[in-house]
Amino acid sequence: MDSASTIGDQVLLRPAGGIDSWIGEAAYLGRGFGTAMMTLAIDRCFADPTVTAILIDPLESNVRARRFYERLGFAFVERRRFGDDDCAVYRLDRARWALSEER
């Protein structure tokens, strides 16, 4: 693994964490499960002091997921194609998460 890589014009220093999630059935959406799950996952990633950022890449067409991640503090980085999927890459820096935890 390289010590750094790039997404758009941003250099990502290692280690950066990545999170993949799938909530599932529509009946479970909008009930707070995703927020609770992601908060725990983010906290766990940042419990490792060497993790400086977390990346996620929801489908570009999944507007609901993208708004969800933005509410958690993730910032849009760029659009990227992974295989057959058009994705929107988002990044959450440790410092930004720490600020949101102080609220």
Image (cartoon, rainbow, N blue to C red):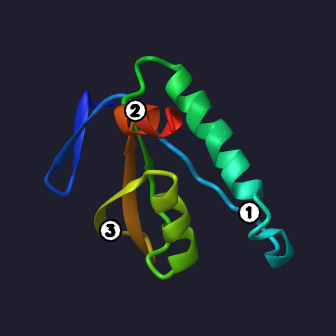
Pick the residue in front: 14 or 82: 14
In the displayed orientation, state which residue is furthest to the bottom.
Answer: 61
Q: Quadrant of residue 82?
A: bottom left
Question: In what element is the residue under mark 3?
Answer: strand
- Compare marks 3 and 1 and give the one earlier in the sequence: 1
The x and y percentages for residue 68 are: 55, 64
Name the amino acid type tagged 3: Arg
The residue singled out by tag 2 in the image is 94
The residue that appears at 48% across and 82% down in the rendered structure is: 61
Tell me the crowding category of disc 3: few under 14, some 14 to 19, or many 20 or more residues within 10 angstroms, Cα based: some
Distance of mark 2 from mark 1, alpha carbons? 24 Å
Distance of mark 3 from mark 1, alpha carbons? 22 Å
Query: Relative to 34, does residue 85 appear above or below in the rendering?
Result: below
The residue that appears at 40% across and 19% down in the rendered structure is: 50
- Compare marks 2 and 1 and give the one earlier in the sequence: 1
| Horizontal arrangement in the rendering, residue 65 relative to residue 10 (left or right) | right
Question: In what element is the residue under mark 2?
Answer: helix
Question: In what element is the residue under mark 1?
Answer: loop
The residue singled out by tag 3 in the image is 80
In the displayed orientation, state which residue is furthest to the right.
Answer: 27
Query: Relative to 63, does residue 88 appear above or below in the rendering?
Result: above
Q: Are marks 2 and 3 in contact (CB under 8 Å)?
A: no
The x and y percentages for residue 12 are: 26, 39
The residue singled out by tag 1 in the image is 23
Name the amino acid type tagged 2: Arg
| Horizontal arrangement in the rendering, residue 29 relative to residue 42 (left or right) | right
Q: Is residue 62 visible?
A: no
In the displayed orientation, state which residue is furthest to the left.
Answer: 9
The residue that appears at 39% across and 68% down in the rendered structure is: 88
Query: Relative to 100, does residue 43 appear above or below in the rendering?
Result: above
Please tell me whether mark 3 or mark 1 is closer to you in this view.
1
